[in-house]
Amino acid sequence: MVVQDKTNSHQYKTMEGNQHKAEANVLLLGALNVGKSALTVRFLTRRFIGEYGEIESIYNHTDKIDGREISFNIWDSLYPQSCESPDSVSEKQLLWADGVILVYSICDRSSFEVVRHQVQLIRQAGKTCAHVPIIIVGNKRDLQHQRVVSSEEGRLFALSADCAFYEISAAETYHGVLLVFHELLELIKESRSVKKGAIGIKGIVRSVSAVFGKKRE
């Protein structure tokens, strides 16, 4: 596990490379105390650590999926003090990210509202960022007796926002966390395939236009 400096983060933007290697930039967003860092560390080390200070970091982790090496760069963001601040999602973060994980606590309705707000900010971003793959994660499923956000509410919101949805307990199981990151990787791959196809079509259209746009002599 390596902590990376964000000043050099744009070097990770490519997911190209040789046939057996790929790279993905994953941005974690959400309010304070929802378990973003616990979820990240669970994925990186399989261990659960419950207490964290207010630290923002980018971690690097290499995993092997279907015989292919995947380098995950994970930006564990720090939520600003002002709940409605537009700075809770920055343009720099979105330009860096290949995919986003938005985390809320099922025991804290205000954290669910933060996720709603952040989805809106992402969807209102520029064309290059507005369609970034998003997974919404309801964390702390082990605390059912404190639940204030139902699974159905979380699922319906994710569906309306065109996001994937998971409910997990980072405290109880590694498998659920692993599913989230692997699903996001699949969504990133799909998104890149669509973008490549769109670029290819635009190139063909430009070529055809250039040919038929010439004046006849």
Image (spheres, rainbow, N blue to C red):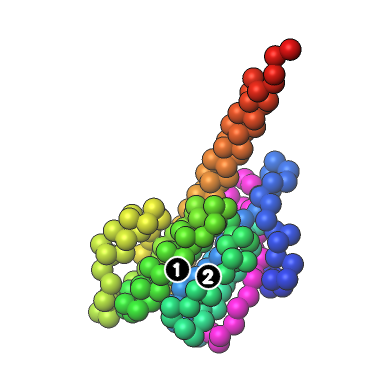
Viewer-proximal residue, 150 or 180? 150
Report if residue 64 lies within the magenta region.
yes
Marks 1,2: beta carbons within 8 A: yes
Q: Dot 1: what SS?
A: helix
What crowding class fits label 2: few (fewer than 14 Cα within 10 Å), some (14-19), or many (20 or more)? many
Q: Residues within 10 Å of mark 1 (few under 14, many from 20)?
A: many
Give the structural element (helix, strand or loop) at label 2. Answer: loop
* Rendered residue at 47%/60% (across/down): 124
Total labels: the figure holds 2
Q: CA distance from mark 1 to mark 2?
A: 7 Å
Most common SS among magenta residues: strand
For image coordinates 35% across by 79% down, the residue present is 110
Q: Which residue is mark 1?
A: 118
Report the amino acid beneath label 1.
Answer: Gln
In the shown orientation, is residue 202 left or right of residue 117? right
| Residue 184 showing in the rendered view | no
Residue 85 visible to the viewer = yes
Is 132 in front, or is 37?
A: 132
Q: Give whichever of discs 1 and 2 has the lower sequence position.
A: 2
Would you say 172 lies left or right of 192 here? left
Query: What's the magenta region?
Result: 52-70
Q: Amino acid at mark 2?
A: Val
